[in-house]
Image (cartoon, rainbow, N blue to C red):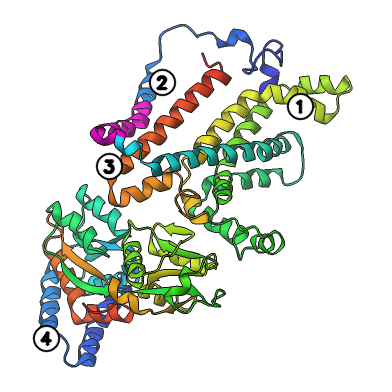
Amino acid sequence: MVTSERAGPVDPHSGFTGRPAASSGQVSGRLPWMLVLPALAGLAFLVLPLAGLLIRAPWATLLERLTEPQVLEALRLSLVCATVATAVCLVLGVPLAWLLARVDFRGRRVVRALVTVPLVLPPVVGGVALLLVLGRRGLIGQWLEATFGITLPFTTAGVIVAEAFVAMPFLVISVEGALRGADQRFEEAAATLGASRWTVFRRVTLPLIMPGVVAGAVLCWARALGEFGATITFAGNFPGTTRTMPLAVYLALETEPEAAIVLSLVLLAVSVIILASLRDRWVNST
Amino acid sequence: MFSRSSRWVVALPAALALGLSGCGSGDPAASPNSASASASAAGGGAKELTVFAAASLTGTFTELGKGFEAAHPGTTVKFNFGSSATLAQQITQGAPADVFAAASPATMKTVTDASSASAPTTFVRNKLQIAVPADNPAKVDELKDLADPKVKVALCAEQVPCGAAAIKALDAAGLKVTPVTLEQDVKATLTKVELGEVDAALVYRTDVIASAGKVKGIAFPEADKAINDYPIATLAKAPAGDLAKQFVDLVLSQQGRDVLTKAGFEAP
């Protein structure tokens, strides 16, 4: 596969890019318009709606709306929940990706397809599915309540569960792709030198695939931050405990479209700042 | 296709006749009105009528729409059901709608304020009820039980009509209820009761009836203080023109009223 075509040795400790230094240079020559035109159109398509928000934003009252306590409360909740959900996805998702990429077992194709189910499922349906399993009368939820007195719906933990459910496939797919692209010879070399499988994973595989893990975690976090359907269905909507920014935006849209625009801008600005700074820190992109 | 629509053509006048004879002293204006409507539309070609209606009207308006299509051969009625506030915004932003039926005068007002609609008429009213799961695990039987902190309650968010009505009713009763969730619309609130995730919720009587036994409804006197009027209006830029008015006439007719009251709405 790809691995056999890779040129030159890669030092797994040299950085997170995991690619030969030579390939990071620019390919010279004229830009092919067949690629540039659609690329520009694509960029415009993605950025124009944002411009629409910026144009319609009520700049005069912006500051006063921003300092409303409910806004900060929802923002804080959003950031906390998305971050914890990403942590949960990392703990469960990286091993799952490893299993899919490195262990040959019967039914692997089916399992891989199942992992993407939350991507295809409308989030609201995902929320109902979570209720049927983890709700007060759900298959597992019933037992959770009877044994430990834990109920997930209408709690902040419920928000994290809903977000992790929807966002995990992004991480798993990204990490699995990185694992398949990583050169397995390093792992084999480590194993012949006597490292256990766990040591190989920790000392060789994980550093090799770190860019994929970071990219996956970023996607996962962004998806969790914007999560709406599964959250409102599974965790409900109550200020302070479960009302995240997307829920606040949706409700504001019912009566005050301008407030909704402000909230959306806050969410956008915060996520762009965090993602851009993370990117500079973790992925030496240029 | 053909056999199905021709069946409707036969069925509807029969149903109409039944409805009228059954009600005896029904609104006399209704019969000539709908008769002339069907006659005038029969001559026209294929037409489309777009109706924006509150989510709580889904069942009844779908039924009325089928009747309208049968009475106006070649006409298709398309519905956009959703939260009244969202629909109102879509209309003021220029969505091509002919008729708007809202679940509250406030949401209709956003549309009339933008002079996007004719003068609205109230066609039905809806009342709140307490909805509890069929087995009523928290033994709720009156409004004040909802104030018990051990009872998990779902309400609609105050931004949507059912939430505004819930606040009015609770205020009228002088009760302070802390819900576990404020749902985005009445159907979402009802779902939480159906799944047993909450012990009680305040929803419309029509939703309790539509749930067909999955939840139990409990009437309470303070509901009279929070009655929701449903206004309907034709829209200023209605692409289907006359058809829009004819649809509104159908909703206001005795036939329309029968369908609506059967579903639990009250006459205004």
Vertical placement of residue A81 versus A2, above or below:
below
Q: Which residue is mark 1?
A: A202
How far, Cα to Cα, is label 3 from label 4?
Answer: 47 Å
Front: mark 4 or 2: 4
Residue A137: mark in rendering: none
**Circles 3 and 4: CB atoms closer than 8 Å:** no
Q: Which residue is mark 2?
A: A35
How far, Cα to Cα, is label 1 from label 3?
Answer: 49 Å
Specify the amino acid type for callout 1.
Arg
The span picked out in magenta is: A41-63
Q: Secondary structure at mark 3?
A: helix
How far, Cα to Cα, is label 2 from label 3?
Answer: 38 Å
Vertical placement of residue A99 versus B212, above or below:
above
Left or right of A139, for residue A45: left
Query: If the image is split into quadrants, where does the C terminus of chain B sit?
Result: bottom left
Label whose residue precedes the other's in the sequence (2 or 1): 2
